[in-house]
Each structure stands twice: as C-alpha cells, then as structure tokens.
Amino acid sequence: MLHTNLSVNEKGHLALAGVDTVEMAEKYGTPLYLVDEERIREKMRTYIGAMSKYFPEGSMPLFASKALCLKKIYKIANEEGMGIDLVSPGELYTARAAGFPLEKAYFHGNNKTDEDIKLAVDSGLGYFVADNREELDSINRIAGEAGINQKILLRLTPGIDPHTHAAITTGKVDSKFGTAIETGQAFELVKYILTLPNITLEGFHCHIGSQCFEIKPFCDAADIMIMFMARVKSELGYLATTLNLGGGFGVRYTENDGDIDIDESIKLIAKHIDSTCARFEFEKPRVLMEPGRSIVADAGVTLYTVGSVKTITGYKSYVSIDGGMADNPRYALYQSAYTVLNASRAKEAPDITVTVGGRCCESGDLIQEGVKIKTPVRGEKLAVLVTGAYNCSMASNYNRLPRPAMVMIKDKKDTLVLRRESFEDLIRNDMD
Ligand SMILES: *Cc1c(COP(=O)(O)O)cnc(C)c1O
C-alpha cells in the first residue's frame, strides 16, 4: 500500500501498524485521528541519526510543533532526543506542561508579542528565531530586565522558490517572514544586532517551503546562507556558528507523489555544505533542520463514518462523512491531495467516483474530489490516509463541532492521547 504501516487484514479492513482501523473507529467513535507512534519514532531516529552522522557536532533536528501539537508528541520528541520549534505561546505552554527541556526549543514567528517573549524568557527558552528589528529590541530589553543574555538565530529569506504551492512557499524575498539578504537589509540588521548587549547571535535560519522532494533548493539556500555568513565574518569580524535550514521534506500523500530518502538526502546536503564551506574558507557550522510533515504525516489516518451517498443525475456523486473541514481544512485551503479508502472494504475494487463532503455548512467543505472507491453504505468507515500532519493542529470548532479524539498505536496496543471534545468543552468559555 501507500506506506509500509498500512495493510488490509483478513476481514478486509484497513489496518494501521497492524491494528484494525474499523475496530478503532467503533471503539473510540468518529471522526478519529489514529496515529502510529512507532512510525513517528522511526522518523525522528532517522533524522537524528543522519544529522549526527553527516553534520558537525551539535547538529540536530527540531520537530516543527505546528505539524502536530499535544503533550504526547513533546514526550516522544524528548525521549528520542529531538529539539523542537515553536511558533506560539500556546505551543510553548504545551511543551512546558509536557516537561520538554526548553533549552532545546527555538521560538519562531513573525510577530512575537512582548508577553510571548516574557513568557519564553521566564520559561528558560533556549533560542528565539528573531524576525524583525522591533522584536530584537523587545528581546534585548526583556532579556536585560531578566538579567540574562538571550541566544538567538536571525531568520533570513535567501530568495529561493522551491516550486511548491505558493501558499506554502516562504523563502522568497517577498515574504512576511524574515529579512531579505538580496536587498542588503539582512546585513544591516546583523550590524544592529551586534550592538545589542543582551543578545547573542548564534547564527541564521531560513525555511524555503514545504513538500519538497528535491535537495537542490536546500543546497541553493545553504550556499546563499554560507556566503552571507562568510561576508559577516570578513566584514564585521563576527563568526556565526549555526545554520538552520528549516523544514520542508515532502511526504507521499497519493500514488502520484514521489518519496524522499531522508538519510540519503541529508548526506547529500551535508556533502554540498562541506564543499561550499571549503570554497569560502568558512568554518563548518552546526546545522539544524526543522522537519514537521515528514515526521508525523504518514503516521496518521483519519476515520469517518459515512452518512449518505448522493448521486446527482447527470452530474456526480457525493459521499457525506461525519467530519470535514473542521478536522482537516487542507483541501478547502489548498486543494491538498489525499488518498481515501473504504476502510470497511479496503480490498474491494473501486466501483464509483465520488466527491467526499464534510458536514459543515459550506459548499467548499470537501475532503477530496474524484475519489475512486468501493461504494460505501451508511455506517461504513471511510479512511483518509497520511493525515498525521496539519490536521489535528489545524482543527477548529466551526459549526460548533467538537474536535476529534486521537489514539496512538504502539506494539499493536491503542492509547487515547487526546480526548474527544465534549459539548461541555464547547460552552466552557461562554458567559451566561
Ligand atoms: C512550517 C515550518 C516548518 C515545518 O515544515 P514541514 O514542511 O512540515 O517540514 C519548519 N520551520 C518553519 C519555520 C516552518 O514555518
């Protein structure tokens, strides 16, 4: 099947990590996020192994929290020895509540408020990835008030467009994130940072985009960053020692997608960086990467219960499910491709082409179109594959739908890691 953790069991049901997904849907209700914990751990180990093998000491992967954020993921990341990247005080609070060592956390975002910065400094955050001058002033002031020196990286835009979808492309010069190298503004900002007494600039960050299957954009970005670091060294006499290349390795959502060998790609990027450093006579920096999607996406499957199959004579057929854009807004947002199966009859040949529609009051609330599937009947379970990233973390309560539960599977045992929201939860903050 699409990924090695997926199979069809003797009942003809889809199984994830050897566990019957239909049974899980019946036990915990739907919609249900089902996650293969061992797969997440394997991916983390692959990144950690490759980065420690091919890059200088101190190099490590940081899990991009925005792909999946709950206490359990930080516990797994900590047990496996990953760092993390955070983009909000809520993610920071969750990591802290999970006991994650925050000295291994990097706080991102293009608009950190003074309150965010204070919370992070008071929590012992390792690094800010600073975005702009106002923020640098604020970090410098708050670090000073706390009597500490705060380590930072500076986010830069290297001017790379990795040819993925525009909405998930972030390394271009025209971006709300970071500061452009090309315009000379990055160099000026570095000069300014070096005058700030309570900040130590350890290095630079860039993130070129998402869902990349090629290493060339990473190598191109690394070249631009290393040339910049070499210029900072020669003209300002300042040696930055960390290069953070961001996230972005692609994931196989459908049979049409390619795949990426994580170990091999990191090896090739490392080789490229070594030769660029040699060419510019620049000390090899420690390297950080920020994988999100490629750590958790293929660990997840979402299960839904079918309500109806409606064929509009002369047009097309709609399958309605008991979830939709509230638990997976990615098709509505970016027309993201997904593989959809009838989990109850996963081996049977498709006999209908359908549009899978959610239950929200929006015509755009679709999970996928043009899906070839075995015609389901009311009550059967539908599975959407590769939903471990940017589904749970993007879920909303639109139409006052309670957000789904998440169950993790390890050694064929299921554990509830995120309780399904109750109606009580929905009105918890409503004032009478
Ligand atoms: C989104 C993001 C990531 C993670 O990207 P993936 O495509 O999920 O690997 C990493 N770093 C930054 C700064 C991001 O914005």
Image (cartoon, rainbow, N blue to C red):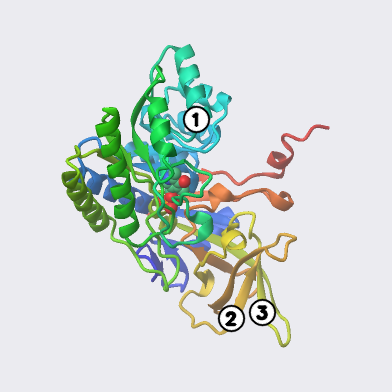
| Ligand 1 has an atom within 8 Å of the beta carbon of the residue at disc 3 | no
Q: CA distance from mark 2 to mark 1?
A: 53 Å
Q: Are marks 2 and 1 in contact (CB under 8 Å)?
A: no
Residue depth check, mark 3 versus mark 1: number of the one nearer the observer: 1
Count residues near mark 2 (Cα–Cα under 10 Å), then give few for <14, some for 14-19, many for 20+.
some
Q: Which mark is residue 317?
A: 3
Q: Position of residue 245 (x, y in %)?
A: 34, 46
Q: Is residue 313 visible?
A: yes
Say what amino acid the circle numbered 3 marks: Ser
The residue positioned 38% from the left and 51% from the top of the image is 295
Give the mark nearest the N terminus, 2 or 3: 3
Q: Are marks 2 and 3 in contact (CB under 8 Å)?
A: yes
Say what amino acid the circle numbered 2 marks: Thr
Q: Is residue 365 above or below residue 244?
A: below
| Ligand 1 has an atom within 8 Å of the beta carbon of the residue at disc 2 | no
Count residues near mark 1 (Cα–Cα under 10 Å), then give few for <14, some for 14-19, many for 20+.
some
Q: Which residue is mark 1?
A: 133
Give the mark nearest the N terminus, 3 or 1: 1
Pick the quarter of the image with the N terminus.
bottom left
Q: Which residue is mark 2?
A: 353
Say what amino acid the circle numbered 1 marks: Arg
Residue depth check, mark 2 versus mark 1: number of the one nearer the observer: 1
Q: Is residue 36 visible?
A: no
